[in-house]
Structures are given as structure tokens and as C-alpha cells.
Image (cartoon, grey):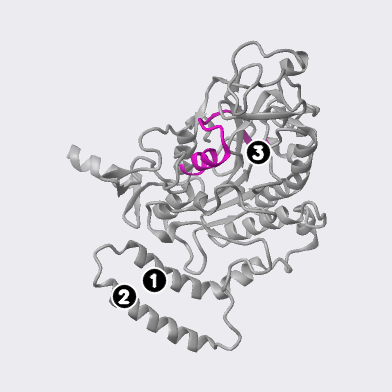
Amino acid sequence: MLALSALLRANEDNESVDGLVTRSCPRAKSVIWLFMNGGPSSIDLFDPKPELTRLHGQKYPGKIKTLFPYPGTIMGSPFEFKQHGECGAPVASVFPNLAQHVDDIAFLKACVASEQNHVPACYLVNTGNRQVGSPHLGSWVSYGLGSERQDLPEFVVMHDHRAAPEGGANLWSSGYLPGQHQGVPLRPSNNPILYVNRPSDLSKSTQHAQLDLLGWLNRRHLATRQTTSDLEARIGTFETAFRMQSSIPRLVDLSHETAATSRLYGLDDPECRHFGSQCLLARRMVEQGVRFIQLYHGGYESNWDQHGGLAEGHARNCYETDRPIAGLLADLKQRGLLDSTLVIWGGEFGRAPTAQDRDGRDHNPYGFTMWMAGGGVKPGISYGRTDEFGYLPVEDSITIPDLHATILHLLGLDDERLTFRHGGREQTPTNGLGRVTKEIIV
């Protein structure tokens, strides 16, 4: 009887999706990850440090590890901070619209990574591994939960209209997971997916017949092969692409959105229009059941990597993203979608407390801020703390595996029971290194 009781409880606590065990009652159904490429400065945006202002221009009292040698003197923030909302969270003056939403946000102020250079740092934050070849977290979500739609991808990426980030398509690769779980990039243009439109001289019925023949030939070829995952993924991609010919044009057509919605996302301002359009598309994708959406602000250039001219560079980046992000949070909330959508903000690392080139900052992966909103996260809180210089964590740090484990938990997935055999063993998203940060969960 005891054994039967345990089995019944296990059956109630877990459900199987595509053969994978997940936790029941997920708090989030979708993720929108706003990736600020280049490394935004936490101590200049969300984590003010009075000691930096007091000791501005003085030598740093101790050892500090930076990417470039010979770090400069302590540098105070060029921005003014004010407290906002009932929670009293401090936000820099360059984020006036986002500041109105702090009561919906959980600030994670002691995030910790290990890589000081952009490409391995981006790999680490996205995949949990600093080297190429591991799946993006969105690929794990796609693999673990599957798709609610057969005519839209499960994992979508939109990068900056000026350039892709360093690391390129490897950042949203499915790694050793089956190929159908890799991120599908939507290009910043009127033609978001290459060749998604049917050629004008080809009828739908003719194309359907061609794809039927191609599918038959591919399945015949598949039957003669032992290793089949890549070929199976390719066959499935043809079928999905055919269905996307009708769904994608409707999805990316923003002309039916109201003028008020367009203004909310900043589409009336040329400086905000591109990122605002992507944020609006992300909301539309969530409504259509897309599981995981990642938006990159900043490409190989024109990003958040201000080794010099930080005040001007960060002010420009904040202006381009402030209205779009605030609009996204407001729109999700008024449509009743914020509770089921996990919004994440952050970059690959933060910035150092010392100056570089007099008015910039070097990289700091050892203590930086990210934030989450919606999706089962406690609103209006700050979790974790860095030292008086914003350099190292002193309380409640969150590692990248912790972050990934927490995101998966909010989606109803157990990071240790979500497995894929590769390299002679069962791989998991965190490989035993992650801890779900339950302190930030409702």
C-alpha cells in the first residue's frame, strides 16, 4: 500500500511531455529574454554604489581582475538615481519608463559568471558552457516541452538590425540536441525568414506535391540509415516551413495594431522603432504559443560595450530600449499575459568599478545585475547584494546554472530529469551545477 501510494503521488506530481518528465503546474508558459549584448553596467543602471561617487578618482583598494591590464581609478556613476514604486527600487535617470514598472520586477543583483571576453561569456550565459557545442537554454525548453503550434517555431531569435552579436548563430544552436530545436532567426527586415514566401509561379497544390515527393524520398533514405536525428530534423523542417508560409506573414504584419499600441512600444520614434517592433512581435508570438523568444539589442558593434564614453553610449542604448521594454511589460500585463510570461533582462556580464580610458568601464562577470518579471517570479524585490564597489557578490549570489535551473523550474521542467544522451553519458541543462532559486519564486 505504501508503494502504491508513492506511485500515485508521483503520477500526480509529474506529467510526461514527449516522453520527458516535467513538474506539474508550471508558472510560466513562455519566455521573452531581452539580451543586452556587450555587457550593460549594473552599477550605472540598477545597483548604485555611493562609495564609487565618494572615492571617484582614487585608487581601488585591493586587487581587481579586468580583461585589459592596468585598470584605472575608481569611477563614480555619471547618472542620477531615484527610488521608484512601492518597493523603492533605485533606477538610473536614463530608464524613466522602465522605472515605472519596478513593482513588477525581481532584481537579481549578485549574478556570477566566469568569462571576461564577449564570445565565451555569451556562450556561457546562453548555453551554460563557455565553448561552442552545447544547446541554448531555449533549445532545452523546445526539447522538453515541444510545440503548441505546428506552423510556428518553438524557439525564435531576433538580433539587432545593425549586426548580429559576436558568436553569431552558434549562440542559438541546438548543440547536440536534435536540429529541430535550434533557434529560428527572424531577420530585421520585411522578409524575416528567407524563402518563406512561395514563388509567384508556383501554385500551392504544385508545391504540396513537390514536398510530398521530397518527403517520400527522404523517408526512404532515412530507412537505410542508423544515425537519423539530423535527417529527421530536416524532414520536419520542410513540413514546418510549408506551414509557416501562411503563419509568418500574418505574425509579422504589425499594420493591424492600434496607434496606441504602436506608441506604447515607441514605434513612433525612429530611435526606438526597431527594438520596439521586435518587442511587439515577441508579445504577438507569446499570444500564438511560441515557447521561447530571445531578443538581442546590440550587435558586433553599436552595443553595450563602452570601454570609453560610457555615459553617451549607455544613454543611447537606454533610450533605444526604455520605451519598448516598458511597453512590453505594460502590454503583457494589461492583456493578462505577464503572469504566464517570464521576461528576462541582462547581458553576458556587467562592468568594473574602475575607469578605462577615463570615462569607460572594463568587463566584470563576477557580480552583476539581471532582472526577471512575470512568470511566477516575486514582484518588486531585490535579491542578492554585491560589495560597496559593485565588484563581487557578498550575499545570495546566483550562478548561470542557478539561473537556468530557475528558468526551467518556472516552465515546469526539472533541470536534472531533463536528459539527453551525448558523449557517453546523460547530459542535462545544468549537469548537476544548478540550484533553483526558490527565494525569488511566488
| Residue at the (50%, 51%) spot, across then down | 170
User: How far across and how far down the image is residue 60, in percent?
Assistant: 67, 14
Frontmost residue, 430 versus 371: 430
Q: CA distance from mark 1 to mark 3?
A: 42 Å
**Which stretch appears magenta?**
103-127
Q: Is residue 113 above or below residue 336?
A: above
Q: Which mark is residue 219?
A: 2
Q: Amino acid at mark 1?
A: Ile
Q: Amino acid at mark 3?
A: Asp
Instruction: Decide if residue 272 is on the left or right side of residue 354.
Output: right
In the picture of the structure, the residue carrying the numbered disc 1 is 235
Q: Amino acid at mark 2?
A: Arg
Determine whether label 1 and label 2 are within 8 Å by CB: yes
User: How far across and how far down the image is residue 248, in percent?
Assistant: 59, 69
Secondary element at image label 1: helix
Q: Is residue 6 above or below residue 357?
A: below
